[in-house]
Image (tube, rainbow, N blue to C red):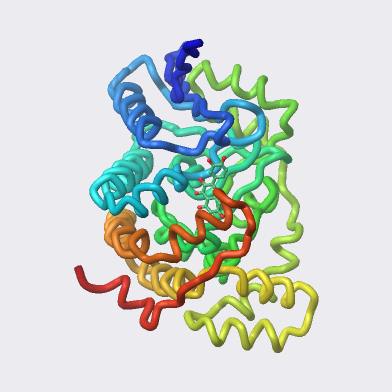
Amino acid sequence: MAETAEPTVVARREEAAGTILMNRPRALNALDLPMIEGITAALRDFRDDPAVRLVVLEGAGGRAFCAGGDVRRMRELALAGDAAAIEAFFANEYAMNRAIAEFPKPWVSLIDGVCMGGGIGVSVHGSHRVVTEHALLAMPETAIALFPDVGTSFVLPRLPGALGNWLALTGARLKGAEAVEAGLATHHIPRERLPALRHALLAGDAGVVDRFAEPVAPGTVAAQRPAIDRCFGTDSLPAIRAALQAEGTDWAREQLATLDRMSPTSMAVTLELLRRGRTMDLASCLAMELALTRRVTRHPDFAEGVRAVLVDKDNAPRWAPQADPVAMLDGA
Ligand code: QUE
């Protein structure tokens, strides 16, 4: 029996707002190329429509805002040797990230659930990142031998202290309030108030977000910051490991155990990427990331990491460490 294909991006004008729903709930709204094209088209329409005064971006299904990019598909393309299709995906995704950063009206993301990788990319460059107590934000790419992309080589080095290195290397998951503490999110509101906020936003004034937001007190991120800064505030992986060992706490042992599961090549590439990104603008960071996708998706660790985490789900990747990872950032 033929199933009626539901659109995976639903963009509409509702009163003075343009609303965009990422609608692939069974894949936790992970972005495939048609969704990226759909969001990009909606962004252009809403930018040029004077009746639209702000944009509201949401995820369908109640569990996720957006779990990332369609990395399962990227793995298949990598195994098939289809570099052109991989390039098309990332080029379109990063162009969308840049267009969001340059969007001239408020871009309000309502993040109620999982928001990783590509989900960070469609939200963090916008003006308002609203999180609930059910939000979970992370950049987990080192687990699949990718690297923090979607413009986060620009964003992460600008977070306070060593938070960027820590988030990028360990893939640490931040709850909503922690994401506000870290600076990835801007406003915290309880899930139960989200429908009322959404309704209020349709009038076209993003200032209402401030009235709905609840203050976030310094919490776990603030408590861990001194240790994060001591251990992750260097551009050398051996120095980070040595600092964690010297720390001697349960927290430090957990961080070491996490790093031991990640792709060594990916961690080295990531540290250098963030070091370079610190002094570059967003467009240059996105170009650097796009060039890096060509190298990294060809490396066997990428297909292996996606296999271990998302396909076979054995979480036992067999990494093939690269002799000179930083070379992946240089050259053609
Ligand atoms: C690293 C990633 C991703 C990830 C897990 C990682 C990623 C991504 C998904 C994901 C999760 C659930 C889904 C889905 C994709 O997981 O980019 O379709 O249903 O999209 O450790 O980068």
Residue 124 in sight from this viewpoint: no
Report the label total. Answer: 0
Residue 257 in sight from this viewpoint: yes
As drawn, which residue projects farthest toward the front? 1
For the point 72% across and 68% down, which residue is it?
224
> At which x and y percent is residue 288?
29, 62
Instruction: Decide which of 283, 273 is in the foreground and name it.
Output: 273
> At which x and y percent is residue 112?
64, 35
For the point 41% across and 55% down, which residue is it?
149
Going by the image, does 54 lie left or right of 133? left
- To which quarter of the image does residue 49 belong? top left
Which quadrant is the C terminus positioned in?
bottom left
Instruction: Decide which of 305, 285 is in the foreground and name it.
Output: 305
Q: Is residue 118 above or below residue 58?
A: below
Instruction: Decide which of 289, 111 is in the foreground and name it.
Output: 289
> At which x and y percent is residue 279?
35, 68
Instruction: Decide which of 40, 3 is in the foreground and name it.
Output: 3
